[in-house]
Image (cartoon, grey):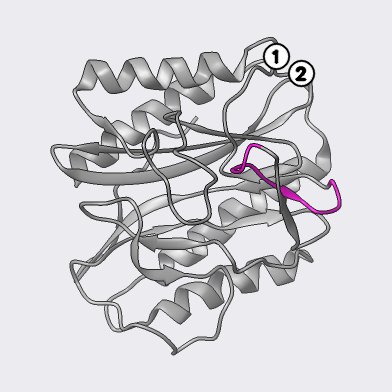
Amino acid sequence: MRAAGRFVADVLTELKSRAAVGVNLLKLDAIAHEMIRARGAESCYIDYHPSFGASPFGKVLCTSVNDAVLHGLPHDYVLRDGDLVSLDFAASVDGWVADSAVSVIVGTPRPEDLRVIETTERALDAGIAAARVGSRVGDISAAIGQVAAEAGYSVNTDFGGHGVGRTMHGDPHVANNGRPNRGLPLRAGLVIAIEPWFLESTDKIVTDPDGWTLRSADGSRGAHSEHTVAITEDGPIVLTARARG
């Protein structure tokens, strides 16, 4: 799965560098689509139609802007100064999947937006650190939830991390809050996506008319950070690690 992880990381690195004031969300999706074609990879999103989706997703990238935090369906929207955008991307390379997300601010940042992004990133690091042989899924969830609680954010547990392998979403579910020493034992060879997402002042979400985009119920902004992580006897390996900077 390392090849899939590297590809997903490369795509998000490129998209992060291209997200700027004046750029259309559809352009970002087109960039990701072209990179998929050039690599000979397959999109995990374009035909994706789970029970909670109104129809097949139809795009290859999730773009969630400001008060949208998950499953943002790319549409004809031009990024504006100060927008907070979360980019979530998954692809299959040679039959193996990797999944990752990053949140960025285009133009002038607001302090509260920087804080929620930084908190999701710290929560992700805490969840990864807990992903060790001999621990349990609940240990990951508890580590994420502790970071959120210390920062004053409430946590929605409807959507969270998940198993990754031949398909994008599989067992186990990895909630972003929970109790330690509970849930599936973590064994070497398990690969999971760990993905904390927090909203600035609520844990309630609503669905857009597009049937996909999830927004905060009170209009507050949110952020989303995610990595695909392999659990090994030597500790967790972040398969979707991006170059710093």
Q: Nearer the viewer, residue 89 or 243?
A: 89
Residue 133 in the figure: left or right of residue 61 = left
Q: Residue furthest right?
A: 218
Residue to which mark 2 is pinned: 80
Residue to which mark 1 is pinned: 21
Residue at 45% across, 34% down: 244
Residue at 18% across, 66% down: 189
Residue at 63% across, 33% down: 104
* Secondary element at image label 1: loop
Q: Give me the disc on residue 172.
A: none
Q: Residue furthest top?
A: 22
Neighbor class of circle 2 (other Cα within 10 Å; few <14, some 14-19, many 20+) is: some
Residue 231 in sight here = yes
Q: Residue furthest bottom?
A: 181
First in sequence: mark 2 or mark 1? 1
* Position of 83 relative to 217 (above/below): above
- Please tell me whether residue 214 belongs to the stretch shown in magenta: yes
